[in-house]
Amino acid sequence: MIAGTGLDLVEVARIEKAARIDRFYTKNFTQNELDLFADKKYNAQTVAGNFAAKEAILKALGCGIFDVALIEVEILRKETGAPYAVLHGKARETADAQGISAVHVSITHIAQFAAAQAVAETE
């Protein structure tokens, strides 16, 4: 059963500007995500897509960035390239408290924008 949905749209240029500050990466992304970005040569659309996915997931969980830090939502890729989420810390606790057993995420982007949709599911 669907417990929540989330949608987020990010301007790629805004992420490029924020990424000029070193703390942007360490504050918002896990080491696994940083490794993914390095493999993609820090492509701004990939970074923006991950950022949008994190925000979409928080919306699907019914909370915001003031309740759960973005770094507690990890967005990785399967071998096929499909994104998937791993929840840590307070994000995991929030999902568990609501009986959420899975969070599905989809990311898309064009030159100017990245968007993500998330669906939180209970058994």
Image (tube, helix red, strand yellow):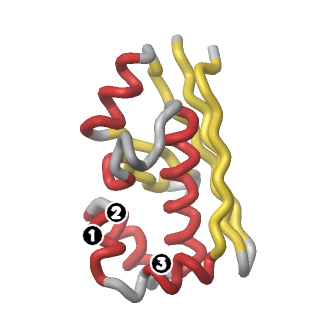
Q: Secondary structure at mark 3?
A: loop
In front: label 1 or label 3: 1
For the residue marked with disc 2, what is the amino acid?
Phe
Q: Secondary structure at mark 2?
A: loop
* 100 shown above or below 53: above
In the displayed structure, would residue 85 be above or below residue 113?
A: above
Please name the residue that numbered disc 3 is placed on: 40
Numbered disc in front, either 2 or 3: 2
Report the amino acid beneath label 3. Answer: Lys
Secondary structure of the residue carrying numbered label 1 = helix
**Residue 26's disc number:** 1
Q: Which residue is mark 2?
A: 29
Upstream in sequence: badge 1 or badge 3:
1
Q: Residue at x 66, y 66 (%)?
A: 114
Distance between the alpha carbons at the discs numbered 1 and 3:
17 Å
Observer-nearest residue: 58 or 111?
Answer: 58
In the rendered image, the residue lying farthest to the front is 66
Among the 4 quarters of the image, the one containing residue 104 = top right
Q: Residues within 10 Å of mark 2 (few under 14, many from 20)?
A: many
| Residue 45, placed above or below residue 58 | below
Mark 1 nearby-residue class (10 Å; few <14, some 14–19, many ≥20): few
Q: Is residue 4 left or right of residue 110?
A: left
Query: How far across and down, in percent of the image, does residue 5 sit?
Result: 64, 33
Q: From mark 2 to mark 3, how far is it between C-alphas? A: 15 Å
Residue 23: x and y in percent read 28, 76
* Dot 1 and dot 2 residues touching (CB under 8 Å): yes
Q: Residue at x 63, y 66 (%)?
A: 10
